Image: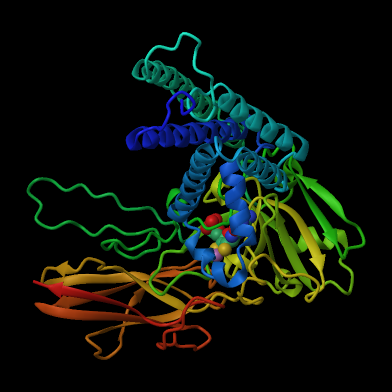
Amino acid sequence: MEDQEPGPAGDEHAASVGVAALTGTLCAALALAVGEFADALSPRLESFVIAVGDVFVDLTPGPLVRTSIETLGMAQKAVLLGGITVGTLAVGALTGILAPSHRRLSLGVIAALTLFGGWATSRSPLTSPAWSWAVVAIAACAAAGALHFAPGPVRRRAPPPDAPDDPRIRYADRRGFLEWAGGISVASVALVGVGRTLLADDTVQVARRRIVLPAPATTTTAGTTTTVTTTTTGPESTTTPPTTTEAGLPTAGDLSPYLTPNPDFYRIDTALTVPVVDPGDWKLSVTGMVDEPYDLTYDEILDMDLVEETVTLACVSNEVGGNLVGNAVWTGVPLAGILERARPQPAAGQILGLSVDGFTAGFPLELATDGRTAMLAVGMNGEPLPLAHGFPARLVVAGLYGYVSAVKWLSEVVLDSWEGVDGFWIPRGWAKEAPIKISSRIDTPRTRRLSAGRQPVAGVAWAPLGGIAAVEVSIDAGPWQPCRLGEAASGETWVQWLHTWDAQPGEHRIEVRATGRDGLVQPAEPVPPAPNGAEGHHVVRVSVA
Ligand SMILES: Nc1nc2c(c(=O)[nH]1)N[C@H]1C(S)=C(S)[C@@H](COP(=O)(O)O)O[C@H]1N2
Ligand SMILES: [Mo]
């Protein structure tokens, strides 16, 4: 176009830059779409966006990701993936603008992006390197082909021999460009859309739904699951009879249920998409400092004597009053037996769980045999583990924060010396030993405005392994008043607590603290989550009308 226009006017130049940028953007979009399509075709292929996201998560220096155990929540993952997509399209736009004048440079950028994409998608332990490189080659060819056929300033064209006047040529070029752009857009959207509907993980979801967990041989949950009282309130009734939670306390406002339903259970992990593991091809290897390493299949695990334990899982990043904590009944096999069969060597001092996605977490070997729940878990609240919570198998160790113990999508249990290896978060600034600290949380009231009169103040408190002896609340910095406690399966779980408060009009401050059965009173001094767990009392301010 520039060839045929001697001295393009300012807005014509701007228009040609715009066309060039859009050309580059669409070529990049097509390449990304090829990656999305491949991602859906097979669990052994990964989308470019997710693979580059993983690079960010893995390679960001420790101090920068110090808070990431917490900040890689779902919203942050969306921001990261969205940022990578927008960033890639922007590089595409820039390359499109540079292409006509700096051919070499733009080819260099395309080559670099291709190599980076191939490296990023092939480095994950879940993907097939050969196929990943094949996909990146296809994506690069698709983008190069699209660029080749792009009309407009990116591809210099000699004007047709019988070229009429300029405006008509521009009009014809514009139509050609719009057709091209429409074609590339439709192709990109179709690749992503068809990929999404193919959903390669469907087969695993179906396999999971067909699994029937065998009945456990033992359980520590009995007695805590009393029937929820259903009430019938006729139109003439003036008061609502109290209903009870399954732990024996009356239900109160937003008090957390004793057992956290699976869909409400917090999720924390470094995985940008949930690893999809087919239990049919999965096995667990017990390796490292053992005399007899061996593998277990999923069916072999289900055939073992299963136990059921109620255990509270907590994230080290949970702030005081935060919700990165949940309580569930876990079904599985004690880790002690699994390890014993491999015959650990005397030098072994650490159990390192390795996930199919490369995540690792380690804890002292003694903790598998000191009597606490330390389990290879396959079930959560009576169902096979949900995909997001580690299907087909994970570790659950009572009394330890998740980042040093609760490996999801477990693929290997490796014995090593205590000094021999560090789990994923340790070089990133978090403590190597991380017992869960005593904590208490106010669940209700959480709203600013309350009406005067008797109001429930209630929440949960936990202090594994010993458990909670007492929970007290203080209103407006007044005396500590004891609360009623719900039932707990064991010291390994949280308890619900309840206090009835006679709320007087005005502004009020409600503070809670717990005391463990070991006598430890929850410290009031605030401590941030890093490096080994937050401390301090949860305080809620309300205004009573
Ligand atoms: N594979 C894998 N397992 C993992 C993690 C992870 O990032 N990857 N995060 C751990 C952390 S920090 C916590 S707190 C728990 C959370 O388990 P949940 O998501 O089932 O609540 O999983 C642990 N297991
Ligand atoms: Mo965590």
Q: Is residue 414 left or right of residue 137?
A: right
Find residue 426 and report its horizontal and vertical position in percent: 66, 72
Q: Is residue 479 visible?
A: yes
In the depicted structure, whether residue 126 falls above or below residue 209: below
Picture mark count: 0
Q: Residue at x 49, y 26 (%)?
A: 3
In the depicted structure, whether residue 489 falls above or below residue 357: below
* Residue most extreme to the front: 6
In the depicted structure, whether residue 282 falls above or below residue 355: above
Find residue 243 and report its horizontal and vertical position in percent: 27, 57
Find residue 349 and report its horizontal and vertical position in percent: 80, 74
Q: Residue at x 29, y 63 (%)?
A: 250
Pick the front one: 136 or 89: 89
Q: Residue at x 47, y 57 (%)?
A: 73
In the depicted structure, whether residue 348 falls above or below residue 239: below
Q: Is residue 348 left or right of residue 483?
A: right
**In the rendered image, which quarter contains the C terminus?**
bottom left
Q: Is residue 312 left or right of residue 213?
A: left
* Residue most extreme to the bottom: 479
Q: Is residue 219 visible?
A: no
Q: Quadrant of residue 416?
A: bottom right
Find residue 346 and report its horizontal and vertical position in percent: 89, 74
Q: Quadrant of ligand 1?
A: bottom right
